[in-house]
Amino acid sequence: MDYYIVIPIHNEEAFLKSTLDSILQQTFLPKKIILVNDNSTDNTESIIDQYCSEYTLFTKLNSTSSTQHMPGSKVINAFNKGLSLLDDNYDFIVKLDGDVILPSNYFDLISAHFKLNKRLGIAGGFIYEENKNGEWILNHPMDKDHVRGAIKAYSKACFKAIDGLKNAMGWDTVDELLARFHGFSILTDAQLKVKHLRPTGKAYNAKAKRLQGKAMYTMRYGFIITCIASLKMALKNKSVKSFYNNILGYLQAKQNSTPYLVSEKEGEFIRKLRWTNIKRKIKA
């Protein structure tokens, strides 16, 4: 199978070499890797230049955007700019972050999964982060069938069906919901342990706190499901404040009549799916 990788990169000088080396060490290499330098202000671009000069696999694209590290729109805008340099001659496409270390067989196994299951839409491994004792601990959402945004691989058919990635907070949830709407499955492979070098959200600024609630509104969750999802998140993060920020973000989005990311029909499917999962977990 053929595949491309697009990596949106903003100020990753401390981690980027490790990520790119782990790609070069893959037992199954991609056709091309687009490195999108998204307005970096550190030494990121010189690292990109070094790898592009040494390896023909890499192509650099400079992108100008905000210097603020905001979840959602910034990273997907950069991803889409990188995507525009690629043709359609691929079997699956990968959105990767510039602060991860992949096991050497990562894309070998991802490719095998796509080969075996023609209705597989999105695949990935599991994220591990280092604690204070130097131990690599699993840091994954409660839903084990969710592929983290840092390591997403999409079959071509699925990527086209969901019309690519939405440049908004919640893109890495709505993509999976839309994939299921179009009849595709999601797979996470516990064998694929990915080291995440910068803990999730560490670089996000204060403006990002209410975007999760806004995302739930734009995905047409409705208020009750938003409350349940926000409570679950608050319990996981041990943060009452995160619940407050989510609900406030949702209500502000509603008040502002923020455009939805999904159609009414897709929203109805999403709510039914969410309620089914909630009821299943209550019974368990």
Image (tube, rainbow, N blue to C red):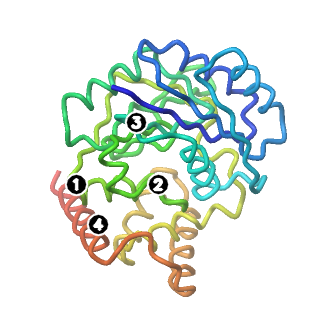
Mark on residue 281? Answer: 1
Element type at mark 1 = helix
Element type at mark 4 = helix
Please tell me which residue is depicted at 78% across the width and 42% down the height of the picture. 40
Q: Where, quadrant-wise, is the N terminus in this rendering? A: top left
Q: Residues within 10 Å of mark 3 (few under 14, many from 20)?
A: few
Q: Quadrant of residue 145?
A: top left
Q: Position of residue 114 (x, y in %)?
A: 27, 32
Residue 131 position (above or below residue 143): above
Q: Residues within 10 Å of mark 2 (few under 14, many from 20)?
A: some
Nearest to N terminus: mark 2 or mark 1: 2
Q: Position of residue 213 (x, y in %)?
A: 51, 69
Nearest to N terminus: mark 4 or mark 3: 3
Furthest toward the left, the residue is 283
Label 4 close to label 3 by CB (< 8 Å) = no
Mark on residue 89? Answer: 3
Task: State how far apart marks 1 and 3 are (Cα).
Answer: 41 Å
Left or right for 270, reference 39: left
Task: Nearest to the eye among marks 1 and 3: give it.
Answer: 3
Q: Amino acid at mark 1?
A: Lys
The residue that disc 4 covers is: 270
Left or right for 39, reference 108: right
